[in-house]
Structures are given as C-alpha cells and as structure tokens.
Amino acid sequence: MSDDTQNDHTHHSHPSQPDIEDQPYEYYQVMAEAVGELLIKKGVFSASELRKTLESIDARSPADGARVVARAWIDPAYKERLLADANKAAAELGIDAGAIPIRVVENTDHVHNVICCTLCSCYPRLLLGLPPDWYKARAFRSRVVREPRAVLHEFGTSIPDDVEVRVHDSTADLRYMVLPRRPSGTGGLNETELAAIVTRDCMIGTALPDASQSAS
C-alpha cells in the first residue's frame, strides 16, 4: 500500500443512514425483550443489574480498541498474541472484551481488511463502543460485500489496485476488528500518541490512520 493513499473525509463524507433501531421491532427483537423480562422475573438477574450492564456497554468507546492497536504497533510479541486471541490480549491491558470471540485481522502491504455484518449489526462493542448508524444500515451491509472499493471511496479511502480488499462478515458468534497499518513518520510517537491517531473507522477498515492528526 502506498504512503500517499488518500483518506479525506472532508470532501467524501459517507451519507447518514437511519438507525435500524428506529424501526418497529422485528421477531427476534421481541424475543430478546421477552427473554430479558423472563430472566428478571425468575431472579437470574435484577432489572438494576441489567441496566448497569447495558450502561457499561453503552459507555465503551473506540479508545479501548485504539489502545490495543497502539500496543500492537510498538510490541511485536503483543501483536502476535493479539492476532492469536484478541480477547486475552485485550485483558492484558485491563480491557474486558467480553465472552464473544473477536478476531483481529491485520492490514499489510498487500491486504486491506473491512468488517461488516450482513445480517444485522454484530460488532465488537466492548472494544469499539457503539456501532455507527451507517454500519447498521442496509445500504452499507449489502454493498460493502459486493463493491468494497466503491464503498471505501465514498468514505474518502482509496486502496491501490494492487492491494487486495477483504471483507469480513461478523456474526453473533464471532466479531472482527481491523489492525490498521502504522503510518510512516510516526517513529517518534509514544504509545499514547499513537493511540490518539487510531479512530473507530480505522478499526472497521473504512479509514486509514492519519499521522498528521497526532499532537505536535
């Protein structure tokens, strides 16, 4: 991948999409609500415990994932552990990535990775926070698997023709996160400064880290 790959969101912003949660509940959403109410009624957990768990999930942000990426950039041994078992590697940094396995896919000179969920909105929320509206929109979910380069271009991210674009479909049983390439010119940045240039979209694969965003 060339160092001059463009990633300009100013002129190529992706159109906002409606949140699927704004739509009427579908069958499985109704079932999820019913199961939750039943578990509370049977005393498996309380409504307060459920609320606190949901609040904890909602409070997560991409900063946790960015910390993981920054550590992988500066520590090759940690990167190997991350690629082997992302949940355990996150725990090394005090980050609870949950019980659902997360597979980290690494961008290289020859491969650029993008994640999606073609069925709904499966997403590594405990590492990246809440998914953006466009991630849940049918327009993104259906198109990125068919024409990923065109979709990336709409985000302002152009991938050279000699770089393969791989799309990974997250499921209820397996989530994905992208390990972006470390930008050139960041050799003098410490781990905290590196984490600051890793955005949510970089870890979805729709953007590239921008070294110019680091604090001077």
Image: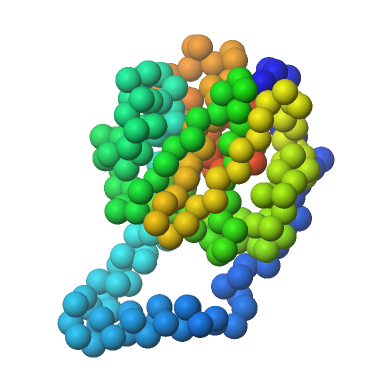
Q: Residue at x 44, y 37 (%)?
A: 104
Residue 156, percent from left and from top: 75, 38
**How many tags in the picture?**
0
Toward the right, the furthest residue is: 11
Q: Is residue 29 visible?
A: yes
Q: Is residue 9 visible?
A: no
Quadrant where the C terminus is found in the figure:
top right
Image height of 17 relative to 69, above or below: below
Judging depth in this view, the residue of 31 and 156 nearest the camera is 31
Of 172 and 19, the residue lying toward us: 172
From the viewer's perspective, tell me whether residue 205 is left or right of residue 74.
right
Q: Is residue 6 left or right of residue 64?
A: right
- Nearest the viewer among 121 and 57 is 121
The quadrant holding residue 205 is: top right
**What's the residue at 47%, 57% (across, down)?**
171
Left or right of 135? Residue 75 is: left
Whether 167 is drawn above or below 40: the answer is: above
Residue ranking furthest to the left: 43
Pick the residue in front: 180 or 209.
180
Task: Report the coloring of the rendering.
Answer: rainbow
Quadrant containing the N terminus is top right
On screen, residue 161 above or below 11: above
Report x, y in % for residue 127.
41, 46
Q: Is residue 164 left or right of residue 77?
A: right
Q: Residue at x 25, y 82 (%)?
A: 40
Q: Position of residue 119 (x, y in %)?
A: 57, 63
The image quadrant that residue 133 belongs to is bottom right
State the image coordinates of residue 62 (x, y, percent, origin top left): 47, 45
Residue drawn at the location 72% of the way across and 23% of the way down: 162
